[in-house]
Amino acid sequence: MKYIKLLFINVVAICLVCISCDDESNSPTSFEPSAPHVAFQDYPDYMVDEGSSQVLEIPVVLNILVEEPVSVTYSVTETNVVAGTDYQITSDSPGTLIIPQNTKRGHIYVTTIDNDVPNGNLERSITITITGVSNEYSIGYLNKPNYISKKVIIEDDECVEQPSCNWWGALSVEDVGFTTYDGTGSAGANDMELTVVGNLPGSGWFEDQPIVFVLTPSAGDPTVGTAIAARQLFCDDCSGNIGIERYYEATGSFDIATGEISVAYTYTRGDGSTVWTGNNLIAN
C-alpha cells in the first residue's frame, strides 16, 4: 500500500512538471531573462549638446555569447531635427548594426552638428527603435519600452529672436544695495518667458522657488523691452513657520546689449500686505 501511494505521488509530480513546461513554452520570451534577446541597456534618455565633440555611443546588447554574428536593424524617428543638418547616426551599415561573434555588444553612434538654426523651446530629438534581429531572438526585455527604444535629446546652442534665452544659465542676482546671490535662468513655457531661480528679495528663507519673468521686446528695438513678474509664490514655509507664505512681483526692463534685467520688486505676505520693496539687477 505504501508503494502504491509513493507511485501515485511521483506520477502526479511528473504531470505537474509537464504542465509547467507547457505553460512556460507559451509565455512571452521577453519575460524570460535566460531566453536569447537583444535590447538597449536600461539607461535613461541621452542628452548631448549641439556641436559637441562627444560621439555618443549607444550600446545594444545580447544576454548570451553567440558563435555567429547577429544583425540588428533599427529605425530613427526625428522630432524637429534633420539628419545631416542637426545630427549624424552611424553603425555598421545604414539602419543596421552587427554584434560580432563571441561578444554580447554592438554600438550605434550619434554625433551632433553645429548650425545656425534657432529652435527656441522646441524639443529636438531622435528616437532609435530596434525593429528586427537575426537568429529569431526576442527584442527587448520585460516588456519595458526603454529596452526597445532610446531617445537622444539635442540641446540647441542658438539664441532665438525672442530675448529670454540671453539669460539662460548662470546668473548674478543682486538685491540692489544689499547682497548679490548666485542664480540660474532657464526657458519658460514660451520664448518670452524666463524662469529665474535665485534669492531675488534677499530673504532669509530662500527655498529655490522659481520666478517667471515675461520679457516683451519693444516694437522698434527687439534688444530692449519690458520685464514683468506677476505676483508669484516665493516661499510657503517662510520664517521657519509652516504655512507662512511670501510672494514676489516685479516690473522693469531688459537690455540684451548690457546683459541686464532691472526691476523694482514688492515682497508681500499672503494677505497682500507689503513686507518690503526693493530693486533687482539680474545679469548674465
Image (cartoon, grey):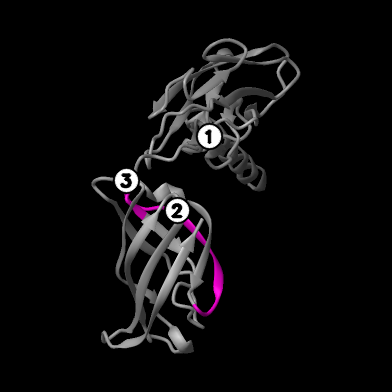
Q: In which quarter of the image is residue 66?
A: top right
| Residue closest to the eye, 174 or 88 | 174
User: Label 3 vs label 1: CA separation?
Assistant: 46 Å
Q: Quadrant of residue 118?
A: top left
| Residue closest to the eye, 210 or 237 | 210
Residue type, label 2: Ser
What x and y, as percent, mark residue 222? 32, 45
Residue corresponding to mark 3: 222
Residue type, label 3: Pro
Q: Look at the image and give the residue range highlighted in magenta.
A: 177-193
- Residue 189: say if magenta: yes
Mark 1 surroundings: few (<14), some (14-19) or many (≥20) residues within 10 A: many
What x and y, as percent, mark residue 201? 44, 77
Residue type, label 1: Tyr
* SS class, disc 3: loop
Query: Which circle, 2 or 3, is nearer the viewer?
Result: 3
Residue corresponding to mark 2: 186
Q: In this view, does 83 lie above or below 238?
A: above
